[in-house]
Image (cartoon, rainbow, N blue to C red):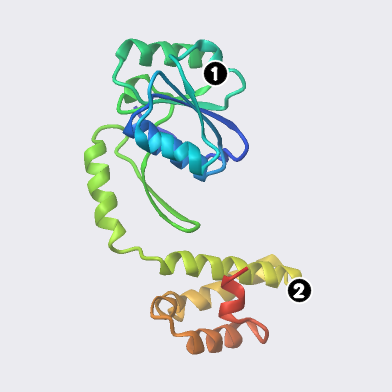
Amino acid sequence: MSFYPVNLDIKNRGCLVVGGGAVASRKAKTLAECGGIVTVVSPKFSEALLALEKTSTVTLICRPYETSDLDGKFLVIVATDNEELNRRVNADAESRNMLCNIADVPDICNFILPSIIRRGDLVIAISTSGKSPAFAKKLRKDLEKNFGDEYARFLTLMGAARKKLLSTAHAPEAHKPLFERLINYNLLELIKNNRKEEINRLLCDVLGEGYDYDELVKQ
């Protein structure tokens, strides 16, 4: 099967997780971090899920899954080892044309979840199209060594600089060469090494006066 890569906006959308173990906890946490309104249903919950409910907007419902749990939901993720339940939820979701993922069972999913590296606004997704989640996990761990927190700061700076340029009536088509110069002058490396004076000189040379690194990244 060939999957179509896509990033979903789930902010303020209802998301259901079926299951109460470690996998369900990870799924619920990620959904909540992305702005989803998350409900988890299961007859019992792990300590991690109980703790998550206390520190986030995740809601736990302690009982077996019911078809009506899908009412008003945008997507459902199933994280159980009960094959009959997995297939039931999938069938219920398909009948409603809902997005449905069954953890580690790509054959009955209409979307799968990649292994993810997240550095602020930078998201790198790794997928083996469901063939080997273990290999996707290994690739993620290998790549994580090459992408540090400087990437998050870099994108925060670039986004803030772009917003400021737009506020001063700069034409959007004029931004590309400016940002290409910042990238080609190794701005990322300067940020990695926290060389603020050099960063500010570069910003001034390329963008003009009024662009301060500390001010931009704290916005």
Distance (Cα) linking label 1 and label 2: 47 Å
Query: What residue do we see at 76% from left, 74% from top?
Result: 168
For mark 2, what is the residue?
168
Q: How many numbered discs sit on the rendered protein?
A: 2
Vertical comparison of 84 with 113: above or below? above
Q: SS at mark 1?
A: helix
Rendering coords of residue 83 (x, y %): 30, 14
Query: What residue do we see at 51% from left, 77% from top?
Result: 182
Task: Name the residue at the right extreme.
Answer: 169
Task: Bin the neighbour count of mark 2 within 10 Å (Cα to Cα): few under 14, some 14-19, many 20 and up.
Answer: few
The tag earlier along the polypeptide, 1 or 2, is 1
The quarter holding residue 104 reads top left
Q: Nearer the viewer, mark 1 or mark 2?
A: 1
The quarter holding residue 178 reads bottom right
Q: Amino acid at mark 1?
A: Leu
Quadrant that contains the N terminus? top left
Vertical comparison of 137 with 141: above or below? above
Query: What residue do we see at 44% from left, 85% from top?
Result: 195
Rendering coords of residue 152 (x, y %): 47, 64
For mark 1, what is the residue?
70
Camera-side residue of 69 and 175: 69
Quadrant that contains the C terminus? bottom right
Vertical comparison of 169 with 122: above or below? below
Rendering coords of residue 74 (x, y %): 57, 27
Q: Amino acid at mark 2?
A: Thr
Task: Bin the neighbour count of mark 1 within 10 Å (Cα to Cα): few under 14, some 14-19, many 20 and up.
Answer: many
Rendering coords of residue 29 (x, y %): 44, 40
Residue 155 makes an appearance in the image: yes
Q: SS at mark 2?
A: loop
Query: What residue do we see at 35% from left, 31% from top?
Result: 46
Residue 6 makes an appearance in the image: no
